Image: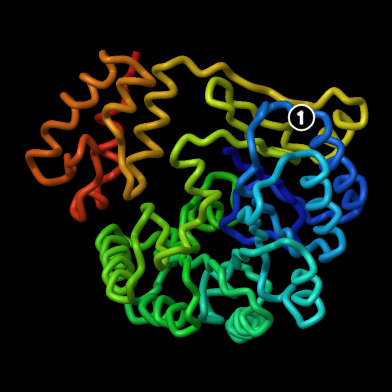
Amino acid sequence: MAGLYIHIPFCAKRCIYCDFFSNTHMGYKDAYIDALIKEMELRKEYLPEQTIETVYLGGGTPSQLSPAELGQIIEGVYNNFQVTAGAEITVEVNPDDINDSYVKGLKKLPVNRVSMGIQSFRDRELLFLNRRHKAAQAIDAIKLLQDNGFYNISIDLIYGLPDQTSEEWDANIRQGLALQVPHISAYHLMYEEGTTLYQLKEAGKIQETDEENSLQAFTDLIDTLKSAGFMHYEISNFALPGFISQHNSSYWRNIPYLGIGASAHSYNGQQRDWNVSSIPAYIDGIKKEIPAIEGEHLDRFTCYNDAVITGLRTMWGLNLPEVEKKYGADLALYCKKQAEKFIKNGLLNHENDRLTLSAKGIFTSDNIMSELLFIK
């Protein structure tokens, strides 16, 4: 089994916090779509004899493309790869791109999961984040998708905004629950260098929320969603039973995947590769049939560290016999030894040969993971 990620880098405008590779110039659109399909032809042997079980069109803003254009790309997938019947096929969308004709166009495609970037149901917060939509548009977009038979919907929310109160954050969570979406991803606002948000902070125009408020917001998120029947299956991701993101879970469970498009990353178990972060350079390389790709070979120590960072983020945790089988008895022993103090103080659970973060350990996950990493 394997996954396929397709990067659509186009956005109508940039959000102030975003550091993903994207471009507001749509002039490259047609040539880029052609290049995506051509790259599939050129790189379809990257995952030899692997069946594609998940396809994810992310961005950027994939809904800046029409359903017909998305259909061209998805047709390219089926023409070049063996795709499992009933494969999870996800498209990221923005609320203000969703209207009746757009949804009816999506229904003609094999898309069976929609991930919507909402971030907040409060207009004041949306304006601060430089989002294009209003809260009412997000609510209407979700209902429109549901009315047309899309039930596997994920929404993104952001907490830890400057001056965001606990009441405001709670209202955001409860609005998502009221809309009966089965998957919620929630992320703390990050001040990434090079973003407008980072520049505002450095200029003293805004202040980060303090650690106490951040921890309380995360606690409220976990408690509210668990009470509503959601599984906390990854640090930032919650799902009702049967609605876990299969594609994103493949990243955390070390399942191979191929990334198509500018800046997209790929992983086949021994090698990590990434495409150039430039639309013109990407298109030019594909046209010449010499894709602009860099990569690195992964030794067993790097693979072990990756397994620690990804595995401990999830409810499945780190399988110790698997660590020994894949990375060696010495690293398995090292892992167990480093984990001992965290098991004793209740931050890690050790059950059925698995290490998982405890309810308390989730709040100090970065520190725990760093202690289990092997530094040569």
Nearer to the camera, 348 or 191: 348
Q: Position of residue 185 (x, y in %)?
A: 46, 62
Q: Quadrant of the N terminus?
A: top right
Q: Quadrant of the C terminus?
A: top left
Q: Who's the residue at 75% across and 41% down the image?
A: 261
Is 359 located above or below residue 118 in the figure? above
Q: Quadrant of residue 113?
A: bottom right
Q: Which residue is mark 1?
A: 43
Q: Who's the residue at 74% across and 51% down the image?
A: 8
Q: Quadrant of residue 284?
A: top right
Q: Position of residue 357 (x, y in %)?
A: 24, 46
Residue type at numbered disc 1: Arg
Q: How many marks?
A: 1
| Applied colour scheme | rainbow
Is 138 located above or below residue 46 in the figure? below
Q: Position of residue 303 (x, y in %)?
A: 43, 23
Tell me: 361 left or right of 135: left
Q: Who's the residue at 30% across and 36% down the image?
A: 318
Nearer to the camera, 359 or 53: 53
Mark 1: give few (<14), some (14-19) or many (20+) Cα within 10 Å. some
The residue furthest left is 344
Q: Position of residue 17 (x, y in %)?
A: 56, 57
Nearer to the camera, 207 or 116: 116
The residue furthest front is 85
Q: Secondary structure at mark 1?
A: helix
Tell me: 313 left or right of 1: left
Is 208 located above or below residue 41 in the figure? below
